[in-house]
Image: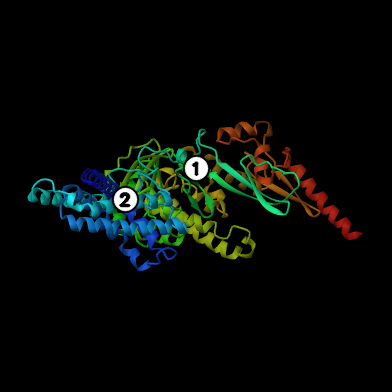
Amino acid sequence: MKILVGFVRIFVGIFFIISGLVKLIDPIGFSFKLQDYFAPDILNLPAMEPFALWLSVIVVVFEVLLGVMLILGYAKRFTLLSLLGMIVFFTFLTFYSAYYNKVTDCGCFGSAMKMEPWTSFWKDIVLLVLVLILFYGRKYIQPFFTANLRSFAVLITLMFSLWLSYHVLMHLPVIDFRPYKVGANIQEGMSVPDNAPAPIIQYNWEYEINGKNEVISNTTGQDPKPEGGTRVGVETEFLREPYEPPIHDFSMERDGEDFTEALLEEEHLVMVIAYNLDVTEHPGYLNIKSVTDEALKKGYTVIGMSASSTEETEALAKRHGLNFDFYFCDMTTLKTIVRSNPGVLVLEKGTVMQKVHWNDVGDISLDTLETAIPKLNFKLKRQLDSIMVLDQKYRDEDYFDNFKLQNAIDSTNLVFVEKVFAEYGYPGKSMVGKKTEQAAWYVVQHSNKIPEYLPLMKEAAASGELDSKAVAMMEDRFLMGQGKEQIYGTQGYYINFDSDKIPIIWPVADPENVEARRQKIGYTTDLNEYGKLMFGEAFEYRAHTLYDVKRLEKENVHYINLLKDL
């Protein structure tokens, strides 16, 4: 018994120390698990959720202390009673979770090791038996060292545990066991490896044979068709669940569109994560604004990630003067990515290169890229971003119902843009960035001032400040409006014939060389492919002349008049 108690004492002590330390390096993660237990559909203790973080720190520090105290033989009666009380409580929790299938991971070992509910329960049963052995054989637990040394060791353990918990709360976990750790690639974490074990499905075929129901099971999926049997039904169950990638709920969505693939292919991406704006640390955004503005000037793509609504994220951006848009992602996923609200990541094609707490954003190191915009005018950028949103406000299926409102907006936008032209010239890439460079172009494109400002647009394109394709579209649109041939073939046109609309590419000057002109300004599609993008796959390009258009329209008028006469 003495040998058994001695072994169990060391084993249980080390187990509690390891279990406590694993959670102590990430107490926020353990607090999320406690919040799961406090949820209405589990323990129904929502009033405890605000205290989850402090409870997690107290529990894990106490867990480490109990392990050390057990090994040292310090305060034996108190230690054993505390161990017994703690293990009984957690045995109840794990049984409840397993039986009702409420919390699929107990969080006993933090993010380092995920345990299935029933596995966790039986683990606690074993620990409970071991603690009962210690309680029964407590007379064999003899203290190590002197009383003063034991007290000093316990004090040092307490101070170290409190310091470590404070350190990781003010920064980030010192060891990251999650699939978003520095060096991990998110796309790889979302994929299923070739050597992943295939799921095993058991088919339970129920047949009525000689008046009795029997179940015949197999994993082939083939109906056994027993002689003289009538099939009642079939049910399936997984003997081995399908492989689930470590990252399975990650997404980047905005306005109903999924940008995950595109953004994870960005070579240089700065990601600000604020999973819940109701509890975000607003003092952190002062430094985050400084770092993200620097990143934008150095040529990085900068985005925000949150589970809060678009209205809330836009209000946050306005409150702190943030110059980037937020995308939506699941809150649990964002909590897993970084234990900070807000926190900042730097990614290169989906690989996490840097990750910091908002207290440490000054530690982020950013290179100056070839796409750097050192003179980026953030105030003007925000104004033009707003202009671009207003420019598209009613340009949808309800445009004709709201064209007066849109015209009023267009007029106001034009007044602002003309003032910008007078003060800055064209606000292009080096002034407002690639995303915003076309804002002023849109306003002019939707006005009657194209002849006046087209030369300014051409000059901006020639200096690399504006996309040449945008200027080509403006020039072609202007020429088509004048009834002249376009140059680059960017404008489509519908000829109304009877009840049908015949789509064409508006006539092009010098059609033999139009493809060379298009390639020169950056188009990668020929006119036939371009037409299919505009009008659908059934479209086939034909080089019409201005005479063709006039003749088709004239024949259409003649056909309509003929019908009237009949």
Q: Which quadrant of the figure has residue 518?
A: top right
Residue plotted at (62% across, 62% down):
398
User: CB atoms at circles 2 and 1 under 8 Å apart?
Assistant: no
**Residue 427 visible, this orientation:** yes
Residue plotted at (40% across, 61% down):
315
Give the crowd class for mark 1: few <14, some 14-19, many >=20 residues within 10 Å.
Answer: few
Residue 510 spot, x, y in % from top left: 67, 34
Amino acid on which disc 2 is placed: Leu
Give the crowd class for mark 2: few <14, some 14-19, many >=20 residues within 10 Å.
Answer: many
Residue plotted at (43% across, 47% down):
425
Question: Is 51 above or below relative to 122?
Answer: below
Residue 520 spot, x, y in % from top left: 56, 32
Residue 344 spot, x, y in % from top left: 34, 48
Residue 394 spot, x, y in % from top left: 57, 60
Residue labelled with disc 1: 262
Q: Which quadrant of the figure has residue 490?
A: top right
Amino acid on which disc 1 is placed: Ala
470 vs 217, nearest the viewer: 217
Side of 135 where 33 appears, left or right: right
Residue labelled with disc 2: 127
Colour pattern: rainbow
Mark toward the start of the polypeptide (2 vs 1): 2
32 vs 113, nearest the viewer: 113
**Farthest residue toward the front?**
1
**Residue 313 visible, this orientation:** no
8 vs 347, nearest the viewer: 8
Mark nearest the camera among 2 and 1 is 2
**Farthest residue toward the bottom?**
47
Quick one: SS at disc 2? helix
Quarter of the picture holding the C terminus = bottom right
**Farthest residue toward the right?**
566
